[in-house]
Amino acid sequence: MNSIASGLILLTYKGKVLLMHKQKSVIDEENHPWCLIGGIRERKESFEKALSRRVQKEAGIKIDNVQVLSEFCYHAELTDDNVNKIQRKEFQLLDFFAPREIGKLFLSSSTQAFIAKHASLISPIASLTYSSQFGIMDKVKAD
């Protein structure tokens, strides 16, 4: 198969965000940032199908309700059933974080960009913005 593009999916559950942290051995924040699950679209495959396939591979759950947010950015709200069926693999962490916790994590650059672009979806009360000058996430109250 020929891959042609990639995208990220924001998986939310009861106001929290599911993030993935992969490692080869011990946790090393410099080399292993937290990230959203991402997928590569194959020829003649929709992004929704590609990301559903990737979520099933990474978390062991099937999702059907993938929504387009913007180019290469997608969202799905997880159900109780989804959350109860999540399967973590060896050397992989999958965890839910509240919006205020996300700003304290070491995130991949693509996840930082996604969060900055779609912060209102993550937290209707507060928005998270990425400060490229300092390389950190700052919590800013929405107007």
Image (tube, rainbow, N blue to C red):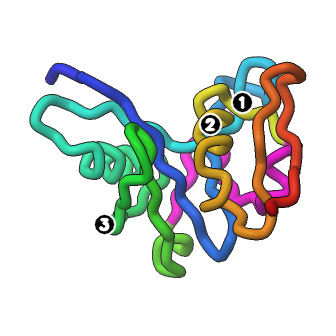
Of badges 2 and 1, nearer the viewer stands 2
* Location of mark 2 (residue): 111
Q: Where is residue 45 in the image (x, y as percent from the top left)?
A: 16, 40
Residue positioned most to the bottom? 80
Q: Position of residue 81 (x, y in %)?
A: 47, 79
* Location of mark 1 (residue): 33
Q: Which amino acid does label 2 sit on?
A: Thr
Pointer 1: residues within 10 angstroms few (<14), some, or many (20+)? Answer: some
Q: Which amino acid does label 1 sit on?
A: Pro
Along the line of sight, which residue is nearer the eye, 135 or 18?
135
Q: Considering only vertical position in the picture, is 126 above or below 108?
A: below
Helix, strand or loop status at disc 2: helix
Q: Do the residues labelled 2 and 1 touch (CB within 8 Å)?
A: yes
Helix, strand or loop status at disc 3: loop
Helix, strand or loop status at disc 1: loop
Pointer 2: residues within 10 angstroms few (<14), some, or many (20+)? Answer: many
What distance separates the C-alpha of mark 2 from that of mark 1?
Answer: 9 Å
Q: Is residue 20 left or right of residue 32?
A: left
- The residue under the point 67% across, 46% down is 93
- The residue under the point 65% across, 76% down is 14
What distance separates the C-alpha of mark 3 from that of mark 1?
Answer: 27 Å
Q: Where is residue 106 in the image (x, y as percent from the top left)?
A: 80, 33
Whether residue 92 is visible to the viewer of this picture, yes or no, is no
Q: Is residue 72 left or right of residue 98?
A: left
- The residue under the point 20% across, 31% down is 42
Magenta region: which residues? Answer: 86-104
Q: What residue type is labelled 3?
A: Asp
Q: Considering only vertical position in the picture, is 132 above or below 74?
A: above
